């Protein structure tokens, strides 16, 4: 089985070392690099081609949110977990809008890092209930627009569920359908929205008020 390759972006040297140790402690994970800033993030991601990125939100010179935007604009769909001190910070919402896959509180790194990585790789979006509420409130504040993409009712329901960070397995349970059926619906959603990944689909759905 191929090991999971990881890149870390964190300006605090002690924390960067601590996260690096957590990654290297797992036999099935490989640390490709740990950097103190994101000034050349696109080149670093292109050079290393990681399976996963751990990204601090607040960094000097340039924020993790700006880094996520640049990565996504380059059509790179690598899962990105944001690392933050506060769980009620609107920066977290901005990061998710920019294309982040989820986030993790720094105080929970030692206990929840592996679970969060597993959740992201399974198609979920790790986040606290308070941030999930912010995401839902943000979606509810925006008026619905005309269904220009011809999404069916079920496709819109699944897209909304995806936008809340639910995994394929959870969606299957929610709508009492098989995971294969969920995959078929999601494939259709991608085709209709002209996207190639869950991150792109969710970002488009929120930005264009489809959910």
Image (spheres, grey):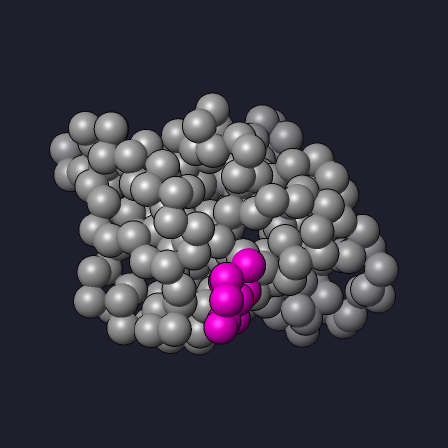
State the image quarter where residue 49 is shown: bottom left
Is residue 60 inside the magenta stretch?
A: yes
- Left-right relation of 69 to 146: left
- Is 162 left, or right, of 180 in this rendering? right
- Image quarter of the N terminus: top left
What residue is drawn where x is 44% and y is 28%?
110
| Quarter of image, res 174 | top right
Check the image and name the residue furthest to the front.
Answer: 14
Q: Nearer the viewer, residue 148 or 168?
A: 168
Q: Nearer the viewer, residue 159 or 46?
A: 46
Main structural element of the magenta stretch: helix, strand or loop? Answer: loop
> In the rendered picture of this protein, how many numbered marks are placed on residues?
0
Residue at image position (85%, 60%) is 141
x and y, in percent, of residue 89 in the image: 70, 51
Residue 152 point in image, percent of width and height: 65, 56
Which quarter shows the C terminus?
Answer: bottom right
Query: Residue extending furthest left?
Result: 1
Determine if the magenta segment contains residue 27. no
- Span shown in magenta: 58-66
Q: Residue at x 57, y 39 (%)?
A: 105
Task: Let me know if residue 64 appears in the view.
Answer: yes
Percent position of residue 100, x then y: 51, 56
Q: Residue at x 34, y 51 (%)?
A: 8
Res 162 seen here: no
Q: Is residue 17 above or below residue 67?
A: above
């Amino acid at each position: 089985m191929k090991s999971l390759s990881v890149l870390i972006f964190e300006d605090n040297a002690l924390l960067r070392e601590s996260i690096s140790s957590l990654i290297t402690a797992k036999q099935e994970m490989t640390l490709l690099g740990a950097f103190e800033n994101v000034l050349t993030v696109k080149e670093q991601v292109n050079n290393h081609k990681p399976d996963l990125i751990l990204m601090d939100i607040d960094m000097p010179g340039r924020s993790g949110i700006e880094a996520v935007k640049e990565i996504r604009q380059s059509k790179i769909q690598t899962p990105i977990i944001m690392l933050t001190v506060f769980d009620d910070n609107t920066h977290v919402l901005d990061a998710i809008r920019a294309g982040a896959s989820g986030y993790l509180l720094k105080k929970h790194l030692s206990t929840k890092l592996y679970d969060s990585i597993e959740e992201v790789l399974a198609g979920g979006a790790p986040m606290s209930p308070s941030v999930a509420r912010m995401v839902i409130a943000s979606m509810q504040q925006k008026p619905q627009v005309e269904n220009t993409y011809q999404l069916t009712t079920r496709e819109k329901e699944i897209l909304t569920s995806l936008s809340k960070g639910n995994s394929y397995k959870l969606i299957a349970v929610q709508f009492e359908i098989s995971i294969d059926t969920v995959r078929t619906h999601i494939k259709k959603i991608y085709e209709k929205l002209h996207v190639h990944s869950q991150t792109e689909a969710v970002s488009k759905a929120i930005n264009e008020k489809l959910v």
